[in-house]
Image (cartoon, rainbow, N blue to C red):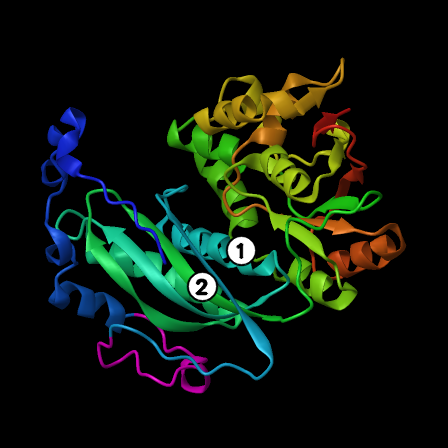
């Protein structure tokens, strides 16, 4: 017999003082972006080349859900991710947010199949052309990924947020996860680090921040499709994408899940242009400090390691790369495939046997 925990919300004095509606400009579904405004935005989006073959329902009839046609024998990967702007340009923000959400599917070796937009936007305060540009950026990345647009949901919100709920496909017995590291695996990182540091400097409008934004867009808007192909073709069993917890945080998630140790070669960590210099000037986001503090007990930093490289390792990444755990015999093929797909891949460490508890060694 199932058990349910029933809590009386009136038993707590603290709960009695909470007024959720005081923090809400609109109540419930009344917060949706008005239909006339939304229709104008959606009509400006380009046609979706994949919808006809993948959607049994129509996106043009205001359906509240989508019905998908799925290939036989495939398993479904589902994820959702959205966040506030990380750059100033609306189109670029849309690209980055979409690429970031798609990475969760790519990290498992999956192929994106369709996605739904998640939008929070101050439609009464900003031109709707800004929202159109954000959605167009996202649509461009979905088209590049070969994924259909299956609809979405919008809220009139004072803070802009955008992202995707993504459905992807994997082979049922051939996908990567974060709990299958094996001692001896090489750890291959497919993008340089430092997006959190660069975004902090851009937000502060530090010096030539427009150039810094271009550097950030170039890496964060890039899809992780190449690493996903490596997972599929080489049958890799362990991988993760690098996002808000930083490289160190996500590696430790893998280590704990796999009961393994991690050796990270600090000098091998690739940094985006200007990232280390900006970190040295103090443009280190609060999330980096939170990430380091959270994993302090599991991190061992060797004497002589530059503290800025520790910051880089725990810098919260937006649409970062993929970490692939590659058995030594497959490493040459993996690196060659990543070079062919244009990915800036580096071996940054290795998986160690776990003795007492999973730890991250930075040497």
Q: Place residue 72 in its image quadrant.
A: bottom right
Q: Place residue 107 in its image quadrant.
A: bottom right
Q: Pick whichever of labels 1 and 2 is earlier in the sequence.
A: 1
Asked whether 356 or 18 is in front, the reply is: 356
From the viewer's perspective, tell me whether residue 259 is left or right of residue 47: right
Residue corresponding to mark 2: 166
The extreme front residue here reads 1
Residue corresponding to mark 1: 104
Asked whether 107 or 294 is in front, the reply is: 294
Whole-angstrom CA distance, mark 1 to mark 2, is 9 Å
- Whether tag 1 and tag 2 are in contact, CB under 8 A, the answer is yes
Above/below status of 231 relative to 345: below
- Mark 2 crowd level (few <14, some 14–19, many ≥20, 10 Å Cα): many
Q: Quadrant of the C terminus?
A: top right
- Point 76% across, 64% down: residue: 235
Q: Is mark 1 on a helix, strand or loop?
A: helix
- Magenta: predominant secondary structure element? loop
């Amino acid at each position: 017999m199932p058990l349910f925990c029933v809590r009386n919300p009136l038993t707590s004095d603290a709960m009695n003082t909470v007024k959720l509606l005081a923090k809400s400009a609109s109540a419930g579904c009344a917060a949706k972006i008005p239909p006339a405004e939304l229709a104008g935005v959606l009509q400006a989006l380009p046609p979706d080349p994949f919808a006809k073959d993948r959607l049994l329902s129509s996106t043009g009839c205001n359906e509240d859900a989508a019905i998908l046609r799925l290939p036989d024998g495939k398993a479904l990967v589902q994820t959702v991710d959205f966040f506030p702007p990380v750059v100033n340009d609306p189109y670029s923000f849309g690209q980055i947010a979409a690429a970031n959400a798609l990475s969760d599917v790519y990290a498992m070796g999956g192929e994106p199949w369709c996605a739904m937009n998640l939008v929070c936007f101050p439609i009464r305060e900003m031109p709707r052309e800004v929202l159109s540009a954000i959605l167009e950026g996202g649509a461009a990345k979905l088209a590049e990924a070969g994924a259909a647009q299956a609809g979405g949901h919008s809220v009139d919100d004072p803070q802009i947020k955008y992202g995707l709920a993504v459905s992807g496909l994997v082979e049922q017995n051939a996908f990567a996860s974060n709990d299958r590291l094996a001692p001896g695996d090489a750890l291959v990182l497919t993008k340089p680090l430092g997006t959190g540091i660069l975004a902090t400097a851009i937000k502060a409008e530090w010096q030539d921040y427009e150039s810094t934004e271009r550097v950030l867009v170039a890496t964060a808007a890039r899809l992780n499709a190449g690493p996903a192909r490596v997972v599929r073709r080489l049958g890799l069993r362990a991988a993760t994408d690098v996002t808000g917890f930083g490289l160190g945080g996500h590696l430790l998630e893998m280590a704990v899940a796999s009961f393994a140790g991690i050796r990270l070669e600090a000098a091998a960590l690739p940094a985006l242009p200007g990232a280390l210099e900006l970190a040295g000037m103090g443009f280190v986001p609060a999330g980096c400090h939170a990430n380091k503090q959270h994993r302090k007990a599991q991190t061992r930093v060797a004497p002589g390691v530059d503290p800025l490289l520790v910051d880089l390792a725990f810098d919260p990444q937006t649409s970062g790369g993929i970490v692939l755990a590659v058995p030594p015999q497959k490493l040459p093929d993996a690196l060659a495939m990543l070079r062919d797909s244009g990915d800036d891949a580096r071996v940054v460490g290795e998986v160690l046997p776990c003795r007492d508890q999973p730890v991250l060694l930075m040497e």
